[in-house]
Image: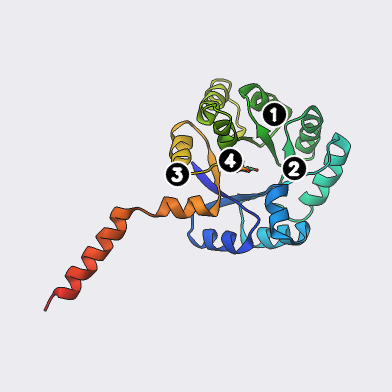
Amino acid sequence: MKFFIDTANIDEIREANALGVLAGVTTNPSLVAKEGVSFHERLKEITDEVDGSVSAEVIAEDAEGMIEEGKELAAIAPNITVKVPMTLEGLKAVKRFSELNIKTNVTLIFSANQALLAARAGASYVSPFLGRLDDIGQEGIDLVSQISEIFDRHAIDTEIIAASVRHPVHVTDAALHGAHIATIPFKVLDQLVKHPLTDQGIEKFLSDWNRQK
Ligand code: E4P
């Protein structure tokens, strides 16, 4: 499983990229709005920093509008992936983007059938939202499992991005249940690095080292 970072914050993206584990970036309108910057300028900065896929979401709700917006986003850099919501109009747009060789990430996936439809329409990625399913009392990870099994069984090469990741257990579960990618907030990346026994171990090694002579 690969790691994407789920943020539009350029400092977080640079810091994550320096770790050598970053395969891409996902953004959404809420994450961009939080930054209070020009969307296109920020996307340029991000694509200058990161070689992997950078998901940029369309705002339009009709297929024509999505296609226009998506083309503009895709023109920013070759590694832009157009993020499209899972709707009938979204599927039409995905089909068109696929004909234009523009990569797509179908977002707001909450059922295996939605994922299958998105894949058949030509999506490069599907994003099942773990945390938001957990929030309403459903096991988000079961959805990743189902999608993974269906894609394997039918030899579908659309990649599964585990999204709406809230904590390290989501990350381990996503890897175990067949997600190709987990897109994680910077806070979760930081939590993945840390372990109290690692910190204690370092402290003990250093104190033993300093006691010698
Ligand atoms: C990423 O593609 C999604 O937009 C994001 O993970 C959603 O996360 P949230 O449910 O924490 O807002």
Q: Is mark 2 within 8 Å of ligand 1?
A: no
Residue underneath mark 1 = 118
Of badges 2 and 3, the one in the foreground is 3
Task: Give the percent coordinates (x, y) of residue 175.
Answer: 46, 37
**Looking at the image, do the residues carrying marks 2 and 3 touch, with CB atoms under 8 Å apart?**
no
Residue underneath mark 4 = 164
**Looking at the image, do the residues carrying marks 4 and 2 touch, with CB atoms under 8 Å apart?**
no
First-in-chain label (1 vs 2): 2
Task: Give the percent coordinates (x, y) of residue 177.
Answer: 47, 31
Of badges 1 and 2, the one in the foreground is 1
Residue underneath mark 3 = 168
Tell me which image quadrant ligand 1 sits in.
Answer: top right
First-in-chain label (4 vs 2): 2
Callout 2, which amino acid? Ile
Q: Is mark 4 within 8 Å of ligand 1?
A: yes
First-in-chain label (2 vs 3): 2
Q: Is residue 154 above or below residue 15?
A: above
Work out how far the residue at label 1 is from the one at label 2, CA to CA, in angstroms: 15 Å
Label 3 crowd bin: few (<14), some (14–19), many (20+), radius 10 Å: some
Work out how far the residue at label 2 is from the one at label 3, CA to CA, in angstroms: 32 Å
Callout 4, which amino acid? Ser
Residue underneath mark 2 = 102
Viewer-side residue, 165 vs 76: 165
**Looking at the image, do the residues carrying marks 1 and 2 touch, with CB atoms under 8 Å apart?**
no
Name the outermost residue toward the right.
64
Work out how far the residue at label 3 is from the one at label 1, CA to CA, in angstroms: 27 Å
